[in-house]
Image (spheres, helix red, strand yellow):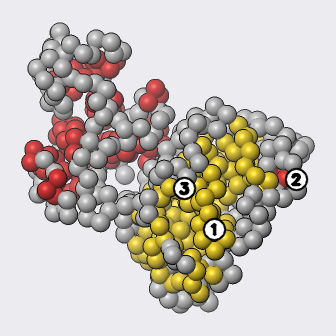
Amino acid sequence: MIKGLLGTGGTDYISEPIQLLGDVKSVSVNRYAVMAVKKDGTLWYWGKPANMKKVTEPTKLMDNVAMVSMDEYYSGPVLMCTVDGSLYLMDAQEFKQIPYDKKVKFVVTNGTDHFFIDENSELWGWSDNKTGTDGSLGVGHTHPVLEPVKIMEDVQFVACDNTNTMIIRKDSTLWMCGKGDDGKFYDGTKEIEGPVLSPIKIMDNVMHVAAQNNHFFAVKKDNTLWAWGNNDNQSLGNQHLSAPVKWADKVTSITVGNQHKVVAKTDNTVWTAGRKDGVYKATQSTQNELRQTAINLIDSPSSWALAEVREAEYRKLVPIAMQSEYTKIVNRSEFCTLAITCIEQAHEMTIEEFLTSKGIEVPTSTPFTDISSLSERARKDIMAAYALQIVAGTSATTFDPYKPITREQAAKMLTSTASTLGEKTDATTPTFADGDKIATWAKPFIGYVVDAQIMGGVGNNRFDAKGGYQRQQAYLTVLRVYKIVTGIE
């Protein structure tokens, strides 16, 4: 670690967690520098990224950034996507745009490999290595790939180290390609000889992954953390792990460095493990087990949703009170607030002014007997959404404001919001393998959101109409409606 990397303005060793920046939505770190994107879309850095001036305090670099990823080493590249979905790679202190005709929503880079996920959930990548690839690019061969090529569809997250790539698809399956650990590649049941040139399925029910130095980590939907591969300086000993080993429970995500691991848990605590200099109150030089480092953290969106959720917040589509509990299933009252906020932001007027412009009157008294305990804002949003026919009651006198919504109900409310904002929403219902589970009333609405690329399937050509709809999913799909009706790229 270089002196000044902690961003405190000094070079002293810091033994307790301290705050460096506020309103930060994502961070990328390597051995020599830190880059942070704030909620307002500004990019900040400290330390010494490749070819840049060293600074010891957070320094603003540019505006309108959605996400950034740095290579783990000093001389490595920096990959970035902007709020409008453009793709850039840093070259000699200057970000140069990489031509691509769709919007980019996620980026990651390590070594010579660069990956991004576009608005259609397609994974693309290329390599700077002019002599060829080693399998980690996942394109099925080892020939040079100097321009972006499509690798896989229905992808929601990707992580990589220098020689391996981990891919989570929308159906929560984990796929991998690359050399493995010293040529040993776990294929889901046993070890095989690497390299694996095209992604193969490794396991099911995965929601987050991380990789570093041929050491692989997967967080499953039951919040268990699993590790395999190279295990140097880890709490599980220093022997090679030939198959995934359960490491911890109640985990939501993990970030890995060269010799350290940082784990976030479901109770909003952070834990660290690895070498002494990166572990809070470590007891030995290496192989320190996970120990609690910080408490009372504010939760954040899942990695696959991060860029769009933060843009939705940046565009004031998500009230501050709702900027938490991102994986919670959104309820009927909350979705009304999102729909009304979208209308207000799209037209830059209050909902009262919008209703007046449409000649619509909100009932002076509510027919719903179960919303009196809600806040004034929530009651107003429910009645406005009701007047605009975005939502209906669950009976003549009840609304069920806290009832979680399903994916088909979300499709209906999103379509109705777009229609209220003047969009033509006629569409043909696509064919899904689980189409018999979709309610007849919902099919036209699902047709529109799929055609408009507001919502998609969940993988394996399924829509999962009765499945729950998370807050973070609601936020990013409301953002997509907003961008369609406003024409913002």
Vertical arrangement, residue 302 with respect to residue 172, above or below: above
Name the side, left or right, on which 458 lies relative to 237: left
- Residue 465 visible from this viewpoint: yes
Q: Vertical placement of 360 versus 467: above or below?
A: above
> Label 3 sits on what residue type?
Val
Secondary structure beneath dot 1 equals strand
Q: Picture quarter containing residue 350? A: top left
Whether 294 is drawn above or below 102: the answer is: above
CA gap between label 2 and label 3 equals 26 Å
Which residue: 54% across, 55% down? 219
Where residue 295 appears, as percent x and y from the top left, is 67, 34
Q: Nearer the viewer, residue 175 or 415?
A: 175
Which residue position holds label 1?
228
Could you say where residue 207 lies in the image, as x and y percent from the top left? 48, 55
Q: Earlier in the sequence, mark 2 or mark 3?
A: 3
Going by the numbered disc 2, the residue's amino acid type is Gln
Q: Which residue is mark 3?
A: 219
- Which residue does the image show at 52% across and 61% down from the upper left? 107
Residue under label 2, please give it.
284
Say which label, 1 or 2, has the lower sequence index: 1
Residue at coordinates 56% horizontally, 60% vertically from top-left?
218
